[in-house]
Image: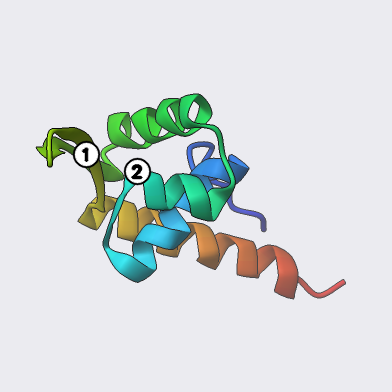
């Protein structure tokens, strides 16, 4: 039957961030903000939730005296994304 979908990844913005990170493995905050068309505040809150779930690692540093935030997907994040996609496929392929 239907598997429960991961509530962390079921958010549109968090799913978009994880989807991007699956393909690039790490990205700067500004790149994620531009690609998801999100506000800085909303994106910040959502990446914090992904971090708390151990789906991403956040590294903060400086580049040319400007703050730089880099998000990296973790092995747990990759596994969670793959399981989420597999569960969605079950919804789509369920015969009526």
Who's the residue at 64% across and 67% down the image? 90
In the picture of the structure, the residue carrying the numbered disc 1 is 68
**How far across and how far down the image is residue 94, in percent?**
75, 71
Q: Secondary structure at mark 1?
A: strand
* Above-or-below relation of 34 to 60: below
In the picture of the structure, the residue carrying the numbered disc 2 is 29
Quarter of the picture containing the N terminus is bottom right
Quote the CA–CA distance across marks 1 and 2. 7 Å
**How far across and how far down the image is residue 75, in percent?**
22, 57
Q: Along the polypeptide, which appears first: circle 1 or circle 2?
A: 2
Q: Nearer the viewer, residue 38 or 47?
A: 38
Q: In the image, which disc is placed on residue 7?
A: none
Q: Are marks 1 and 2 in contact (CB under 8 Å)?
A: yes
Who's the residue at 87% across and 71% down the image? 96
Who's the residue at 56% across and 43% down the image? 13
Res 55 quadrant in image: top left
């Amino acid at each position: 039957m239907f598997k429960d979908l991961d509530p962390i990844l079921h958010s549109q913005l968090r799913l978009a961030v994880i989807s991007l990170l699956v393909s690039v493995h790490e990205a700067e905050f500004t790149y994620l903000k531009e690609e998801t068309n999100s506000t800085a505040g909303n994106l910040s809150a959502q990446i914090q939730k992904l971090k708390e779930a151990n789906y991403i690692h956040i590294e903060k540093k400086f580049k040319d005296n400007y703050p730089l935030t880099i998000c990296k997907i973790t092995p747990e994040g990759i596994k969670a994304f793959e399981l989420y996609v597999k569960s969605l496929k079950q919804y789509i392929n369920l015969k009526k």
